[in-house]
Image: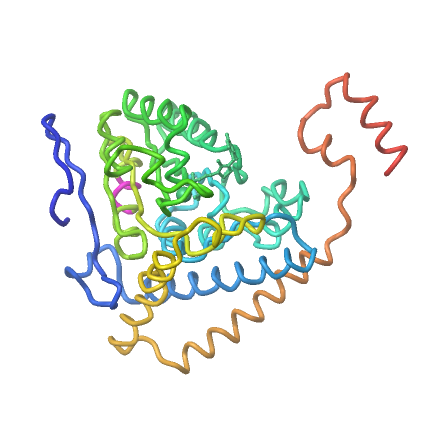
Amino acid sequence: MSKPHLTTTAGFSIQHLQFMDHHGELTQALPSTINHETLIKLYEAMALTRLFDKKAINLQRTGQLGTYPSCHGQEAIGAAVGHAMQASDVFFPYYRDHATFLLRGTPMSDILSYWGGDERGSANMENRASEDFPICVPIADQCLHAAGAAFAFQYRNQARAAVVTIGEGGTSEGDFYEAINLAGAWKLPLVLVINNNQWAISTPISEQTACKTIAQKAIAAGIEGVQVDGNDVIAVHHVMQHALEKARSGKGPTLIEALTYRICDHTTADDARRYIPQDEYHAAFEFEPLKRLRRYLEKNNLWSEEKEKNMLTQHAATLDTIVTKFLERPKAQITDMFDYLYAELPKQFHFQRRELEAEYG
Ligand SMILES: Cc1ncc(C[n+]2csc(CCOP(=O)(O)OP(=O)(O)O)c2C)c(N)n1
Ligand SMILES: [Mg+2]
């Protein structure tokens, strides 16, 4: 671990962790938790996520998808989280976790269906690697769901971890504080991963909080907090593995702040050029996670132009299959909004459902 970033009188400290800088140079020896094979796998997953992202934006721009939140520049967080988790752990995602879904084996055509407003996008749970929850758009609700599941694992004596993701803006919400408080008080097997992309739509982190770091919020809950370079997939992967093992072995929760930058619009319904200072925005591209990992792999003779070309050809074919499956799925039913919301439809909605079906079904 590198030098503490902040130390309190109570003896808690916040570490800032990095293994690889933006030139693709190691700033400390590779941790034993990661090898070159894993790094290549992470690179390929991050590259596929970036292409998926581009494709989804194109689908939205051509009227074939609803609002979509890009994860451009933030792929290292999702890839590290997805790779470090085991199938028996449970993931409580927010809306910018495409890389994690990919590595969790979530059918990516379901993710497109979800953003296409199709209830079946969240419903095909039987296809999924585990008991992962659907995407949560109401900010910070997922932290409470995750704390509840973490309690269930603890109560049943199961060696499983609940992993929840949230943006830095979301950590201003009461639900987030309630979840970390409970996790600390009950020593829950919970890992909270904060994507600090420094913007909450148009609100910059400087206006969001007076805290120097998001990780230090862990101190108030009496839990371990660590800040990592969120563009360094090695660092995120390393802290994730540590936090997951700790959670599964009954040693309690961890809060991980992954520092990155949102080098994209908030969603396709946004135009970030209207509020992000352009010099800051363009400078952030030099720090993005794929570029540095490719540089590292090439310097170590683990990657080449030819391998890149072959990977892109393979990824294009994978994406074609995903998009075809999404576009060719049977049409959604208008009554889905009732049928997927309740296990058993409350009586007062029967009339509404019948009326809707009669008019548009
Ligand atoms: C409870 C709630 N309040 C407001 C919103 C509207 N909203 C959607 S995204 C967002 C900003 C979130 O920013 P952050 O937590 O930093 O995550 P990011 O989008 O940057 O990844 C807001 C306010 C919402 N979805 N839910
Ligand atoms: Mg944010």
Task: Residue lying at the far top in this picture: please name it.
Answer: 348
Give the residue displayed 48% in from the left and 59% down from the top.
49
Toward the viewer: 3 or 120?
3
Q: Which residues are magenta?
A: 241-245
In-image side of 322 versus 182 (left or right): right
Q: Where is residue 187, by image quadrant?
A: top left
Q: Does 188 sit left or right of 317 as displayed?
A: left
12 left or right, relative to 60: left
Q: Is residue 301 above or below residue 163?
A: below
Q: Measuring 48% from the left and 51% from the top, which residue is drawn there?
A: 272
Residue 192, image x, y percentages: 35, 37
Q: Is residue 38 above or below residue 132?
A: below
Outermost residue to the right: 358
- Which is nearer the eye, 261 or 56? 261
Query: Along the line of sight, which residue is nearer the eye, 84 or 225?
Result: 225
Q: Which quadrant of the view contains residue 91?
A: top left
Image point (20%, 57%), residue name: 32
Horizontal placement of 288 versus 59: left or right? left
The quadrant of the image that shows the C terminus is top right
- The image shows residue 327 at horizontal and vertical percentages of 71, 58
The picture quadrant for ligand 2 comes to: top left
Residue 244 inside the magenta-drawn segment: yes
Point out residue 75 in the picture as x, y percentages from the top left corner. Answer: 41, 56
Overall secondary structure of the magenta stretch? Answer: helix
Residue at coordinates 39% horizontally, 46% vertically from top-left? 86
Locate residue 40, reporting x and y percent. 35, 67
